[in-house]
Amino acid sequence: MTAKVTLSFSDETIEEARRFASREGLSLSAWMDQAAREKALREVFTAHAAAVGRAGLDLESAALADAREVGMVHDVLFGRRPRAA
């Protein structure tokens, strides 16, 4: 479902949006929809990251530890992994 709305943009902003939409092969409406959705997701993810930080969780260290563990299991099951170039 889509909703029609009236929005106002500066001449410069709308011209840039038209150029980006054309470059990506999208209509202006589709490009603006995508841009707004991406901005909303960035806001959600930024808020989530801030909440995780306030909670004192270190997800990056946990993810790196998980990756090391997966690597060790791989080594046991399949032998040493080739070194990265």
Image (cartoon, rainbow, N blue to C red):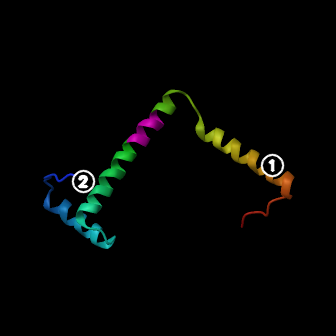
Amino acid at dot 2? Thr
Task: From the viewer's perspective, tell me whether residue 76 is left or right of residue 18.
Answer: right
Give residue 80's quadrant in the image: bottom right
| Residue 46 highlighted magenta (yes or no) | yes
- Identify the residue shown where x is 20% and y is 60%: 13
Q: Which residue is mark 2?
A: 2
User: In the image, is residue 26 part of the stretch drawn in magenta?
Assistant: no
Relative image position of residue 12 (x, y in whole percent): 17, 62
Label 1, label 2: how many angstroms apart (C-alpha)?
49 Å
Q: Which residues are magenta?
A: 44-50
Going by the numbered disc 1, the residue's amino acid type is Val
Q: Position of residue 79 (x, y in %)?
A: 86, 58
Report x, y in % for residue 51.
Answer: 46, 31
**In percent of the image, x 80 and y 60: which residue is there?**
81
User: Sequence-wise, which precedes: disc 1 or disc 2?
Assistant: 2
Task: Tell which of 36 and 84 is nearer to you.
Answer: 36
Q: Furthest-front residue in view?
A: 1
Secondary structure type for disc 1: helix
Q: Residues within 10 Å of mark 1 (few under 14, many from 20)?
A: few
Can you identify the residue that label 1 sits on?
73
